[in-house]
Image: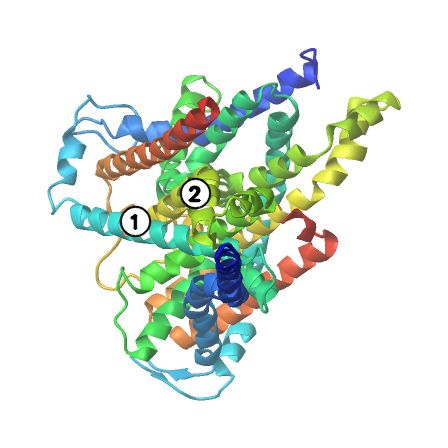
Protein backbone atom coordinates (compact mmCIF):
# COMPACT_ATOMS: atom_id res chain seq x y z
CA UNK A 1 0.00 0.00 0.00
CA UNK A 2 2.78 2.44 0.89
CA UNK A 3 5.07 2.38 -2.11
CA UNK A 4 7.30 5.22 -0.96
CA UNK A 5 8.75 5.12 2.53
CA UNK A 6 7.04 8.16 3.94
CA UNK A 7 7.89 10.26 6.97
CA UNK A 8 5.11 8.39 8.78
CA UNK A 9 6.90 5.11 8.14
CA UNK A 10 10.05 6.28 9.89
CA UNK A 11 8.12 7.64 12.88
CA UNK A 12 6.19 4.40 13.26
CA UNK A 13 9.26 2.25 12.68
CA UNK A 14 11.09 4.14 15.44
CA UNK A 15 8.11 3.70 17.73
CA UNK A 16 8.05 -0.02 16.97
CA UNK A 17 11.80 -0.34 17.59
CA UNK A 18 11.42 1.42 20.95
CA UNK A 19 8.58 -0.94 21.81
CA UNK A 20 10.76 -3.97 21.05
CA UNK A 21 13.56 -2.45 23.13
CA UNK A 22 11.04 -1.92 25.95
CA UNK A 23 10.01 -5.60 25.68
CA UNK A 24 13.50 -7.10 25.58
CA UNK A 25 15.73 -4.50 27.28
CA UNK A 26 15.02 -5.37 30.91
CA UNK A 27 15.21 -9.08 30.11
CA UNK A 28 18.71 -8.68 28.74
CA UNK A 29 19.70 -6.78 31.91
CA UNK A 30 18.76 -9.87 33.95
CA UNK A 31 20.64 -12.20 31.64
CA UNK A 32 23.80 -10.09 31.83
CA UNK A 33 23.55 -9.74 35.61
CA UNK A 34 23.19 -13.49 36.11
CA UNK A 35 26.88 -13.75 35.12
CA UNK A 36 27.74 -11.46 38.03
CA UNK A 37 30.95 -12.26 39.91
CA UNK A 38 30.76 -14.00 43.31
CA UNK A 39 30.85 -10.67 45.18
CA UNK A 40 28.47 -8.88 42.84
CA UNK A 41 25.04 -7.62 43.79
CA UNK A 42 21.59 -7.30 42.26
CA UNK A 43 22.42 -4.23 40.19
CA UNK A 44 25.05 -3.03 37.74
CA UNK A 45 27.99 -2.71 37.53
CA UNK A 46 29.21 -6.24 36.94
CA UNK A 47 31.66 -7.16 39.67
CA UNK A 48 33.64 -9.60 37.53
CA UNK A 49 32.18 -12.29 35.32
CA UNK A 50 31.48 -15.80 36.58
CA UNK A 51 29.15 -18.78 36.53
CA UNK A 52 29.10 -18.68 40.33
CA UNK A 53 25.34 -18.05 40.62
CA UNK A 54 24.46 -20.79 38.18
CA UNK A 55 26.48 -23.21 40.29
CA UNK A 56 24.76 -21.82 43.34
CA UNK A 57 21.39 -22.85 41.89
CA UNK A 58 22.18 -26.51 42.36
CA UNK A 59 23.02 -26.21 46.04
CA UNK A 60 19.72 -26.85 47.74
CA UNK A 61 20.38 -24.52 50.65
CA UNK A 62 20.84 -21.46 48.42
CA UNK A 63 17.40 -21.61 46.90
CA UNK A 64 14.45 -23.86 47.54
CA UNK A 65 14.00 -27.12 45.74
CA UNK A 66 14.92 -25.87 42.28
CA UNK A 67 15.38 -29.29 40.64
CA UNK A 68 12.19 -30.74 42.07
CA UNK A 69 10.05 -27.74 41.24
CA UNK A 70 11.45 -27.67 37.70
CA UNK A 71 10.59 -31.35 37.20
CA UNK A 72 7.07 -30.81 38.55
CA UNK A 73 6.50 -27.77 36.34
CA UNK A 74 7.78 -29.66 33.33
CA UNK A 75 5.55 -32.69 33.96
CA UNK A 76 2.57 -30.43 34.64
CA UNK A 77 3.20 -28.42 31.46
CA UNK A 78 3.29 -31.61 29.38
CA UNK A 79 0.04 -32.84 30.94
CA UNK A 80 -1.66 -29.48 30.39
CA UNK A 81 -0.36 -29.40 26.83
CA UNK A 82 -1.69 -32.86 25.95
CA UNK A 83 -5.10 -32.25 27.49
CA UNK A 84 -5.37 -28.77 25.96
CA UNK A 85 -4.62 -30.07 22.47
CA UNK A 86 -7.06 -32.98 22.67
CA UNK A 87 -9.90 -31.13 24.41
CA UNK A 88 -9.59 -28.01 22.21
CA UNK A 89 -9.51 -30.08 19.04
CA UNK A 90 -12.56 -32.07 20.10
CA UNK A 91 -14.42 -28.92 21.15
CA UNK A 92 -13.42 -27.26 17.88
CA UNK A 93 -14.93 -30.19 15.96
CA UNK A 94 -18.06 -30.06 18.13
CA UNK A 95 -18.59 -26.35 17.48
CA UNK A 96 -18.65 -26.99 13.72
CA UNK A 97 -22.10 -28.43 14.19
CA UNK A 98 -25.17 -27.25 16.02
CA UNK A 99 -25.81 -28.81 19.38
CA UNK A 100 -27.89 -27.94 22.39
CA UNK A 101 -25.80 -25.90 24.80
CA UNK A 102 -23.20 -24.81 22.26
CA UNK A 103 -23.66 -21.11 23.01
CA UNK A 104 -23.52 -21.40 26.82
CA UNK A 105 -20.45 -23.64 26.53
CA UNK A 106 -18.74 -21.11 24.29
CA UNK A 107 -19.52 -18.30 26.70
CA UNK A 108 -18.24 -20.42 29.58
CA UNK A 109 -14.94 -20.85 27.73
CA UNK A 110 -14.71 -17.11 27.15
CA UNK A 111 -15.66 -16.42 30.78
CA UNK A 112 -12.73 -18.60 31.78
CA UNK A 113 -10.42 -15.94 30.33
CA UNK A 114 -12.22 -13.10 32.07
CA UNK A 115 -12.63 -14.49 35.60
CA UNK A 116 -9.73 -13.17 37.74
CA UNK A 117 -7.10 -15.85 38.17
CA UNK A 118 -6.95 -15.53 41.94
CA UNK A 119 -10.68 -16.27 42.18
CA UNK A 120 -10.19 -19.56 40.34
CA UNK A 121 -7.27 -20.33 42.63
CA UNK A 122 -9.32 -19.62 45.76
CA UNK A 123 -12.35 -21.51 44.44
CA UNK A 124 -10.42 -24.66 43.56
CA UNK A 125 -8.53 -24.52 46.86
CA UNK A 126 -11.72 -24.24 48.91
CA UNK A 127 -13.53 -26.83 46.77
CA UNK A 128 -10.79 -29.43 47.29
CA UNK A 129 -10.66 -28.65 50.99
CA UNK A 130 -14.41 -29.10 51.40
CA UNK A 131 -14.51 -32.30 49.35
CA UNK A 132 -11.70 -33.65 51.50
CA UNK A 133 -9.23 -33.98 48.63
CA UNK A 134 -5.65 -32.94 49.06
CA UNK A 135 -4.68 -30.26 46.53
CA UNK A 136 -1.68 -31.33 44.46
CA UNK A 137 0.12 -30.03 41.42
CA UNK A 138 -1.09 -32.96 39.30
CA UNK A 139 -4.77 -32.62 40.23
CA UNK A 140 -6.01 -29.23 41.43
CA UNK A 141 -3.21 -27.20 39.80
CA UNK A 142 -3.72 -29.16 36.57
CA UNK A 143 -7.39 -28.14 36.54
CA UNK A 144 -6.52 -24.55 37.41
CA UNK A 145 -4.06 -24.35 34.51
CA UNK A 146 -6.58 -25.82 32.09
CA UNK A 147 -9.04 -22.99 32.85
CA UNK A 148 -6.37 -20.65 31.41
CA UNK A 149 -5.01 -22.72 28.50
CA UNK A 150 -8.25 -24.28 27.20
CA UNK A 151 -10.00 -21.02 26.24
CA UNK A 152 -6.98 -20.03 24.14
CA UNK A 153 -6.96 -23.46 22.52
CA UNK A 154 -10.70 -23.36 21.86
CA UNK A 155 -10.53 -19.85 20.36
CA UNK A 156 -7.64 -20.89 18.09
CA UNK A 157 -9.52 -24.00 16.94
CA UNK A 158 -12.63 -21.89 16.45
CA UNK A 159 -10.73 -19.53 14.17
CA UNK A 160 -9.12 -22.45 12.31
CA UNK A 161 -12.38 -24.26 11.60
CA UNK A 162 -14.10 -21.01 10.61
CA UNK A 163 -11.69 -20.86 7.67
CA UNK A 164 -11.71 -24.60 6.97
CA UNK A 165 -13.60 -25.55 3.84
CA UNK A 166 -15.77 -28.67 4.26
CA UNK A 167 -15.23 -29.51 0.57
CA UNK A 168 -12.00 -31.40 1.42
CA UNK A 169 -13.93 -33.71 3.68
CA UNK A 170 -16.69 -34.09 1.10
CA UNK A 171 -14.11 -35.02 -1.51
CA UNK A 172 -12.59 -37.61 0.83
CA UNK A 173 -16.00 -39.04 1.59
CA UNK A 174 -16.86 -39.20 -2.10
CA UNK A 175 -13.69 -41.21 -2.63
CA UNK A 176 -14.98 -43.69 -0.06
CA UNK A 177 -13.11 -42.67 3.08
CA UNK A 178 -14.76 -43.45 6.39
CA UNK A 179 -15.33 -40.57 8.79
CA UNK A 180 -12.31 -41.68 10.82
CA UNK A 181 -10.13 -41.90 7.69
CA UNK A 182 -11.35 -38.46 6.61
CA UNK A 183 -10.38 -37.06 9.98
CA UNK A 184 -7.01 -38.82 10.29
CA UNK A 185 -5.78 -38.40 6.71
CA UNK A 186 -7.42 -35.16 5.58
CA UNK A 187 -8.47 -32.91 8.46
CA UNK A 188 -5.69 -33.66 10.92
CA UNK A 189 -2.74 -33.07 8.57
CA UNK A 190 -4.31 -29.82 7.38
CA UNK A 191 -4.72 -28.37 10.85
CA UNK A 192 -1.48 -29.84 12.28
CA UNK A 193 0.41 -26.50 12.35
CA UNK A 194 -2.44 -24.88 14.31
CA UNK A 195 -2.40 -27.80 16.73
CA UNK A 196 1.32 -27.24 17.30
CA UNK A 197 0.41 -23.62 18.06
CA UNK A 198 -2.19 -24.76 20.59
CA UNK A 199 0.35 -27.13 22.12
CA UNK A 200 2.89 -24.30 22.40
CA UNK A 201 0.32 -22.09 24.15
CA UNK A 202 -0.69 -24.91 26.48
CA UNK A 203 2.87 -25.73 27.41
CA UNK A 204 4.24 -22.22 27.92
CA UNK A 205 1.17 -20.78 29.64
CA UNK A 206 1.22 -23.67 32.11
CA UNK A 207 4.98 -23.62 32.59
CA UNK A 208 4.86 -19.94 33.60
CA UNK A 209 1.51 -19.86 35.40
CA UNK A 210 1.45 -18.99 39.08
CA UNK A 211 -1.60 -16.88 40.05
CA UNK A 212 -3.94 -19.83 39.51
CA UNK A 213 -1.49 -22.26 41.06
CA UNK A 214 -1.13 -20.26 44.27
CA UNK A 215 -3.88 -22.02 46.26
CA UNK A 216 -4.02 -25.14 44.14
CA UNK A 217 -0.47 -26.49 44.18
CA UNK A 218 -0.64 -28.36 47.48
CA UNK A 219 2.52 -29.26 49.36
CA UNK A 220 5.03 -29.11 46.54
CA UNK A 221 5.72 -25.88 44.69
CA UNK A 222 5.89 -25.48 40.95
CA UNK A 223 8.80 -23.49 39.51
CA UNK A 224 6.91 -20.16 39.13
CA UNK A 225 5.71 -20.41 42.74
CA UNK A 226 9.30 -21.02 43.80
CA UNK A 227 10.37 -17.99 41.79
CA UNK A 228 7.59 -15.89 43.27
CA UNK A 229 8.70 -16.83 46.77
CA UNK A 230 12.28 -15.98 45.83
CA UNK A 231 11.37 -12.43 44.80
CA UNK A 232 10.67 -11.62 48.44
CA UNK A 233 13.48 -13.43 50.22
CA UNK A 234 16.42 -13.87 47.85
CA UNK A 235 18.77 -10.92 47.56
CA UNK A 236 21.56 -12.42 45.45
CA UNK A 237 21.94 -12.80 41.67
CA UNK A 238 20.98 -16.47 42.05
CA UNK A 239 17.47 -15.20 41.32
CA UNK A 240 18.69 -13.87 37.97
CA UNK A 241 20.52 -17.12 37.22
CA UNK A 242 17.28 -19.03 37.69
CA UNK A 243 15.46 -16.41 35.59
CA UNK A 244 18.02 -16.77 32.81
CA UNK A 245 17.74 -20.56 32.80
CA UNK A 246 13.92 -20.65 32.73
CA UNK A 247 13.77 -17.92 30.08
CA UNK A 248 16.32 -19.77 27.97
CA UNK A 249 14.26 -22.93 28.36
CA UNK A 250 11.11 -21.07 27.23
CA UNK A 251 12.97 -19.71 24.21
CA UNK A 252 14.12 -23.21 23.26
CA UNK A 253 10.57 -24.57 23.50
CA UNK A 254 9.19 -21.68 21.42
CA UNK A 255 11.94 -22.06 18.81
CA UNK A 256 11.33 -25.82 18.58
CA UNK A 257 7.59 -25.35 18.06
CA UNK A 258 8.03 -22.59 15.48
CA UNK A 259 10.76 -24.57 13.74
CA UNK A 260 8.41 -27.53 13.49
CA UNK A 261 5.62 -25.38 12.01
CA UNK A 262 8.01 -23.86 9.44
CA UNK A 263 9.31 -27.36 8.58
CA UNK A 264 5.80 -28.73 8.03
CA UNK A 265 4.78 -25.76 5.88
CA UNK A 266 7.97 -26.02 3.78
CA UNK A 267 7.45 -29.70 3.16
CA UNK A 268 3.86 -29.03 2.22
CA UNK A 269 4.84 -26.28 -0.18
CA UNK A 270 7.28 -28.66 -1.90
CA UNK A 271 4.73 -31.49 -2.16
CA UNK B 1 -25.98 -63.33 -9.11
CA UNK B 2 -24.82 -60.01 -10.45
CA UNK B 3 -27.99 -58.42 -9.26
CA UNK B 4 -27.58 -59.92 -5.82
CA UNK B 5 -24.02 -58.67 -5.51
CA UNK B 6 -25.11 -55.24 -6.57
CA UNK B 7 -27.84 -55.37 -4.02
CA UNK B 8 -25.54 -56.25 -1.17
CA UNK B 9 -22.98 -53.63 -2.13
CA UNK B 10 -25.74 -51.11 -2.34
CA UNK B 11 -27.17 -52.22 0.95
CA UNK B 12 -23.91 -52.17 2.88
CA UNK B 13 -23.28 -48.43 2.66
CA UNK B 14 -26.93 -47.83 3.42
CA UNK B 15 -26.65 -49.90 6.57
CA UNK B 16 -23.47 -48.21 7.69
CA UNK B 17 -25.01 -44.86 6.91
CA UNK B 18 -27.86 -45.83 9.18
CA UNK B 19 -25.44 -46.55 11.99
CA UNK B 20 -23.38 -43.45 11.41
CA UNK B 21 -26.51 -41.31 11.14
CA UNK B 22 -27.07 -41.86 14.85
CA UNK B 23 -23.41 -41.26 15.60
CA UNK B 24 -23.17 -37.77 14.02
CA UNK B 25 -26.13 -36.62 16.07
CA UNK B 26 -24.34 -37.76 19.22
CA UNK B 27 -20.87 -36.75 18.05
CA UNK B 28 -20.88 -33.04 18.96
CA UNK B 29 -21.95 -33.89 22.51
CA UNK B 30 -19.17 -36.44 22.92
CA UNK B 31 -16.67 -34.03 21.38
CA UNK B 32 -17.72 -31.19 23.66
CA UNK B 33 -17.68 -33.43 26.73
CA UNK B 34 -14.03 -32.96 27.84
CA UNK B 35 -14.27 -29.17 27.61
CA UNK B 36 -17.60 -29.16 29.43
CA UNK B 37 -16.32 -31.43 32.19
CA UNK B 38 -13.11 -29.51 32.78
CA UNK B 39 -14.76 -26.08 32.80
CA UNK B 40 -17.63 -27.41 34.91
CA UNK B 41 -15.34 -28.93 37.51
CA UNK B 42 -12.60 -26.31 37.63
CA UNK B 43 -14.42 -23.09 36.76
CA UNK B 44 -18.15 -23.30 37.43
CA UNK B 45 -18.07 -25.45 40.54
CA UNK B 46 -15.30 -23.43 42.25
CA UNK B 47 -17.18 -20.18 41.58
CA UNK B 48 -20.37 -21.66 43.03
CA UNK B 49 -18.31 -22.85 45.98
CA UNK B 50 -16.95 -19.33 46.51
CA UNK B 51 -20.46 -17.88 46.41
CA UNK B 52 -21.58 -20.42 49.04
CA UNK B 53 -18.56 -19.98 51.30
CA UNK B 54 -18.89 -16.20 51.20
CA UNK B 55 -21.89 -16.59 53.52
CA UNK B 56 -20.08 -18.86 55.97
CA UNK B 57 -18.69 -18.05 59.38
CA UNK B 58 -15.03 -18.61 60.27
CA UNK B 59 -12.44 -18.29 62.97
CA UNK B 60 -8.65 -18.51 62.91
CA UNK B 61 -8.62 -22.18 61.93
CA UNK B 62 -11.95 -23.33 60.52
CA UNK B 63 -14.94 -22.38 58.40
CA UNK B 64 -18.48 -23.02 59.64
CA UNK B 65 -21.42 -23.46 57.25
CA UNK B 66 -23.84 -20.65 57.93
CA UNK B 67 -25.90 -18.05 56.17
CA UNK B 68 -24.76 -14.65 57.26
CA UNK B 69 -24.06 -11.47 55.38
CA UNK B 70 -21.38 -10.28 57.79
CA UNK B 71 -18.55 -10.98 55.32
CA UNK B 72 -20.19 -8.69 52.78
CA UNK B 73 -20.97 -6.06 55.42
CA UNK B 74 -17.35 -6.10 56.48
CA UNK B 75 -16.09 -5.95 52.91
CA UNK B 76 -18.42 -3.27 51.61
CA UNK B 77 -18.58 -1.33 54.87
CA UNK B 78 -14.84 -0.93 55.11
CA UNK B 79 -13.24 2.25 53.94
CA UNK B 80 -10.09 0.26 53.05
CA UNK B 81 -12.03 -1.79 50.50
CA UNK B 82 -13.29 1.27 48.69
CA UNK B 83 -9.86 2.84 48.69
CA UNK B 84 -8.36 -0.38 47.33
CA UNK B 85 -10.98 -0.61 44.58
CA UNK B 86 -10.31 3.00 43.66
CA UNK B 87 -6.58 2.28 43.53
CA UNK B 88 -7.11 -0.82 41.37
CA UNK B 89 -9.39 1.11 39.02
CA UNK B 90 -6.76 3.81 38.77
CA UNK B 91 -4.21 1.20 37.64
CA UNK B 92 -6.75 -0.26 35.20
CA UNK B 93 -7.50 3.10 33.57
CA UNK B 94 -3.84 4.15 33.34
CA UNK B 95 -2.63 0.82 32.01
CA UNK B 96 -5.55 0.60 29.59
CA UNK B 97 -4.93 4.08 28.15
CA UNK B 98 -1.21 3.46 27.70
CA UNK B 99 -1.54 -0.06 26.28
CA UNK B 100 -4.31 0.99 23.89
CA UNK B 101 -2.19 3.86 22.55
CA UNK B 102 0.98 1.79 22.28
CA UNK B 103 -0.79 -1.33 21.07
CA UNK B 104 -2.67 0.45 18.32
CA UNK B 105 0.41 2.05 16.80
CA UNK B 106 2.43 -1.16 17.01
CA UNK B 107 -0.38 -3.13 15.33
CA UNK B 108 -0.94 -0.36 12.77
CA UNK B 109 2.74 -0.38 11.83
CA UNK B 110 2.77 -4.17 11.52
CA UNK B 111 -0.41 -4.34 9.47
CA UNK B 112 0.06 -1.42 7.07
CA UNK B 113 3.71 -0.48 6.90
CA UNK B 114 5.56 -3.78 6.78
CA UNK B 115 5.69 -4.78 3.14
CA UNK B 116 6.28 -8.52 3.05
CA UNK B 117 4.22 -11.16 4.79
CA UNK B 118 7.37 -12.94 5.94
CA UNK B 119 8.71 -9.83 7.65
CA UNK B 120 5.27 -9.22 9.13
CA UNK B 121 5.26 -12.69 10.70
CA UNK B 122 8.80 -12.29 12.03
CA UNK B 123 8.06 -8.92 13.65
CA UNK B 124 4.76 -10.23 15.02
CA UNK B 125 6.60 -13.16 16.61
CA UNK B 126 9.22 -10.80 18.04
CA UNK B 127 6.35 -9.09 19.86
CA UNK B 128 4.70 -12.37 20.90
CA UNK B 129 7.65 -14.33 22.27
CA UNK B 130 8.02 -12.42 25.59
CA UNK B 131 4.38 -13.20 26.32
CA UNK B 132 5.28 -16.88 26.34
CA UNK B 133 8.00 -16.43 28.98
CA UNK B 134 7.64 -16.03 32.72
CA UNK B 135 5.73 -12.98 33.98
CA UNK B 136 7.66 -13.00 37.24
CA UNK B 137 11.01 -12.85 35.47
CA UNK B 138 9.82 -10.07 33.20
CA UNK B 139 8.59 -8.19 36.26
CA UNK B 140 11.74 -8.50 38.35
CA UNK B 141 13.85 -7.65 35.32
CA UNK B 142 12.81 -4.03 35.96
CA UNK B 143 14.53 -4.02 39.36
CA UNK B 144 18.12 -3.66 38.05
CA UNK B 145 16.86 -1.11 35.53
CA UNK B 146 14.82 1.14 37.80
CA UNK B 147 16.45 0.60 41.21
CA UNK B 148 18.24 3.23 43.26
CA UNK B 149 21.57 2.14 41.73
CA UNK B 150 19.89 0.88 38.61
CA UNK B 151 20.65 1.56 34.96
CA UNK B 152 18.38 4.58 34.53
CA UNK B 153 19.59 6.35 37.66
CA UNK B 154 23.28 5.71 37.03
CA UNK B 155 22.97 6.88 33.42
CA UNK B 156 21.17 10.06 34.48
CA UNK B 157 23.77 10.76 37.18
CA UNK B 158 26.71 10.10 34.87
CA UNK B 159 25.13 12.32 32.26
CA UNK B 160 24.91 15.05 34.85
CA UNK B 161 21.13 15.40 34.57
CA UNK B 162 20.49 14.73 38.24
CA UNK B 163 22.71 14.79 41.32
CA UNK B 164 20.89 12.23 43.46
CA UNK B 165 19.07 9.06 42.31
CA UNK B 166 15.36 9.41 41.59
CA UNK B 167 13.55 7.49 44.31
CA UNK B 168 10.17 7.03 42.68
CA UNK B 169 11.36 4.93 39.75
CA UNK B 170 11.04 1.68 41.66
CA UNK B 171 8.61 0.67 44.41
CA UNK B 172 6.02 3.21 43.35
CA UNK B 173 2.82 3.53 41.34
CA UNK B 174 5.00 4.46 38.39
CA UNK B 175 6.82 1.13 38.60
CA UNK B 176 3.54 -0.79 38.94
CA UNK B 177 2.01 0.84 35.87
CA UNK B 178 5.22 0.48 33.84
CA UNK B 179 5.52 -3.23 34.65
CA UNK B 180 1.84 -3.84 33.87
CA UNK B 181 2.18 -2.08 30.53
CA UNK B 182 5.23 -4.25 29.87
CA UNK B 183 3.34 -7.44 30.77
CA UNK B 184 -0.02 -6.75 29.15
CA UNK B 185 0.47 -4.61 26.00
CA UNK B 186 0.65 -7.72 23.87
CA UNK B 187 -2.90 -8.68 24.81
CA UNK B 188 -4.09 -5.55 23.02
CA UNK B 189 -1.64 -5.70 20.10
CA UNK B 190 -2.77 -9.14 18.93
CA UNK B 191 -6.55 -8.49 18.67
CA UNK B 192 -6.02 -5.08 17.02
CA UNK B 193 -3.51 -6.57 14.57
CA UNK B 194 -6.03 -9.29 13.81
CA UNK B 195 -8.83 -6.83 12.96
CA UNK B 196 -6.48 -4.55 10.99
CA UNK B 197 -5.36 -7.48 8.84
CA UNK B 198 -8.97 -8.23 7.99
CA UNK B 199 -9.76 -4.73 6.74
CA UNK B 200 -10.50 -4.87 3.04
CA UNK B 201 -7.64 -2.94 1.39
CA UNK B 202 -9.95 -1.72 -1.37
CA UNK B 203 -11.80 0.38 1.24
CA UNK B 204 -8.59 2.29 1.86
CA UNK B 205 -7.92 2.68 -1.85
CA UNK B 206 -11.48 3.92 -2.33
CA UNK B 207 -10.97 6.48 0.42
CA UNK B 208 -7.70 7.59 -1.18
CA UNK B 209 -9.30 7.85 -4.61
CA UNK B 210 -12.04 9.96 -3.05
CA UNK B 211 -9.31 12.34 -1.93
CA UNK B 212 -8.89 11.43 1.73
CA UNK B 213 -5.57 12.24 3.37
CA UNK B 214 -3.61 9.64 5.41
CA UNK B 215 -5.03 11.08 8.63
CA UNK B 216 -8.58 11.08 7.32
CA UNK B 217 -8.22 7.44 6.25
CA UNK B 218 -6.84 6.56 9.66
CA UNK B 219 -9.52 8.43 11.56
CA UNK B 220 -12.58 7.71 9.39
CA UNK B 221 -11.82 4.26 7.98
CA UNK B 222 -9.22 2.32 9.93
CA UNK B 223 -9.99 3.26 13.54
CA UNK B 224 -13.76 2.64 13.27
CA UNK B 225 -13.07 -0.77 11.70
CA UNK B 226 -10.47 -1.58 14.38
CA UNK B 227 -12.91 -1.00 17.24
CA UNK B 228 -13.84 -4.67 17.80
CA UNK B 229 -10.15 -5.54 18.16
CA UNK B 230 -9.65 -2.66 20.55
CA UNK B 231 -12.63 -3.88 22.57
CA UNK B 232 -11.29 -7.44 22.84
CA UNK B 233 -7.87 -6.10 23.83
CA UNK B 234 -9.48 -3.78 26.35
CA UNK B 235 -11.34 -6.70 27.94
CA UNK B 236 -8.06 -8.61 28.27
CA UNK B 237 -6.09 -5.72 29.73
CA UNK B 238 -8.79 -4.51 32.11
CA UNK B 239 -9.52 -7.98 33.49
CA UNK B 240 -5.81 -8.78 33.83
CA UNK B 241 -5.14 -5.56 35.75
CA UNK B 242 -8.20 -6.04 37.96
CA UNK B 243 -6.95 -9.54 38.82
CA UNK B 244 -3.33 -8.59 39.40
CA UNK B 245 -1.71 -9.02 42.77
CA UNK B 246 1.90 -9.97 42.06
CA UNK B 247 2.89 -6.91 40.01
CA UNK B 248 1.33 -4.59 42.58
CA UNK B 249 3.04 -6.44 45.43
CA UNK B 250 6.51 -6.67 43.90
CA UNK B 251 6.70 -3.38 42.00
CA UNK B 252 5.18 -1.21 44.72
CA UNK B 253 7.39 -2.86 47.31
CA UNK B 254 4.32 -3.54 49.43
CA UNK B 255 3.36 0.13 49.59
CA UNK B 256 0.32 -0.13 47.38
CA UNK B 257 -2.68 -2.45 47.29
CA UNK B 258 -5.03 -3.97 44.77
CA UNK B 259 -8.25 -5.89 45.29
CA UNK B 260 -6.64 -9.21 44.39
CA UNK B 261 -3.71 -8.51 46.71
CA UNK B 262 -6.18 -7.80 49.52
CA UNK B 263 -7.80 -11.17 48.74
CA UNK B 264 -4.45 -12.91 48.70
CA UNK B 265 -3.59 -11.51 52.13
CA UNK B 266 -6.91 -12.71 53.51
CA UNK B 267 -6.24 -16.12 52.00
CA UNK B 268 -2.82 -16.36 53.63
CA UNK B 269 -4.52 -15.59 56.97
CA UNK B 270 -6.97 -18.45 56.27
CA UNK B 271 -9.88 -15.99 56.18
CA UNK B 272 -11.46 -17.82 53.25
CA UNK B 273 -15.06 -16.62 53.70
CA UNK B 274 -13.87 -12.99 53.81
CA UNK B 275 -11.76 -13.59 50.70
CA UNK B 276 -14.75 -15.30 49.08
CA UNK B 277 -17.01 -12.28 49.72
CA UNK B 278 -14.31 -10.11 48.21
CA UNK B 279 -14.08 -12.49 45.25
CA UNK B 280 -17.82 -12.29 44.58
CA UNK B 281 -17.71 -8.49 44.61
CA UNK B 282 -14.62 -8.42 42.38
CA UNK B 283 -16.17 -10.91 39.95
CA UNK B 284 -19.35 -8.81 39.77
CA UNK B 285 -17.32 -5.65 39.10
CA UNK B 286 -15.23 -7.35 36.40
CA UNK B 287 -18.27 -8.87 34.68
CA UNK B 288 -20.05 -5.49 34.74
CA UNK B 289 -17.00 -3.88 33.15
CA UNK B 290 -16.92 -6.56 30.43
CA UNK B 291 -20.66 -6.16 29.83
CA UNK B 292 -20.14 -2.41 29.56
CA UNK B 293 -17.42 -2.85 26.94
CA UNK B 294 -19.59 -5.31 25.00
CA UNK B 295 -22.44 -2.78 24.97
CA UNK B 296 -20.19 -0.21 23.34
CA UNK B 297 -18.70 -2.56 20.73
CA UNK B 298 -20.24 -5.72 19.34
CA UNK B 299 -17.42 -8.24 19.15
CA UNK B 300 -19.50 -11.31 18.30
CA UNK B 301 -18.84 -11.09 14.59
CA UNK B 302 -15.11 -11.17 15.28
CA UNK B 303 -15.20 -14.77 16.48
Q: Say if labels 2 and 1 share a chain.
A: yes
Figure disc tally: 2
For residue B201, what is the image quadrant? Answer: top right
Position above or below: A8 against B44: above
Number of other residues with Cα within 10 Å of mark 1, as a class: few under 14, some 14 to 19, many 20 or more:
some
Q: Residue furthest top?
A: A4
A165 on left or right of A147: right
Give x and y (percent) for residue B128.
Answer: 47, 35
- Disc 2 from disc 1: Cα separation: 25 Å
**Chain letter for the residue marked with disc 1 in the picture:** A
Position above or below: A71 against A26: below
B135 on left or right of A68: right
Q: Residue furthest front?
A: B1
As rendered, which of B110 and A116 lies closer to the eye? B110
Q: Is residue B16 visible?
A: yes
Give x and y (percent) for residue B72.
Answer: 52, 77
Position above or below: B174 against B276: above
Q: Residue furthest right?
A: B210
As rendered, which of A123 and B266 lies closer to the eye? A123
Q: Secondary structure at mark 1?
A: helix
Number of other residues with Cα within 10 Å of mark 2, as a class: few under 14, some 14 to 19, many 20 or more:
few
Please give the residue where the numbered disc 2 appears in the rendered image: A185
As rendered, which of B34 and A208 lies closer to the eye? B34
Q: Secondary structure at mark 2?
A: helix
**Chain letter for the residue marked with disc 2 in the picture:** A
Give x and y (percent) for residue B119.
Answer: 53, 21
Q: Residue at x 63, y 16 (%)?
A: A10
Please give the residue where the numbered disc 1 appears in the rendered image: A78
Badge number at residue B11 = none
Amino acid sequence: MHERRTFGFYVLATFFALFVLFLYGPLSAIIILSFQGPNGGLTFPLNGVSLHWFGNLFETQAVGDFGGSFRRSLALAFMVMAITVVASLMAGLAFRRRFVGATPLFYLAVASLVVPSIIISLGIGVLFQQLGFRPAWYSSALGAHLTWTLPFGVLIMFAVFNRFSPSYEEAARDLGASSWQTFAHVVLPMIAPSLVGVALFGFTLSYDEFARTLMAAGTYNTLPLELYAMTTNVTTPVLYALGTITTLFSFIVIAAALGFIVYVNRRRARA
Amino acid sequence: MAVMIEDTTAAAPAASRGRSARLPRMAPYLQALPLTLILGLFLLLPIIMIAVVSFWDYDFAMMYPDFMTLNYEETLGSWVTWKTYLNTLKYAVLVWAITLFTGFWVAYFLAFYVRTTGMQMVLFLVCTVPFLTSNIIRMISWIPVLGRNGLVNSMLIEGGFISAPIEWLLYSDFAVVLAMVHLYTLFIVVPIFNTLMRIDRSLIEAARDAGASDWQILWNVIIPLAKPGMAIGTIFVVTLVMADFSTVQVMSGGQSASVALMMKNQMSLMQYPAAAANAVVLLAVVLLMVAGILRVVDIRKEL
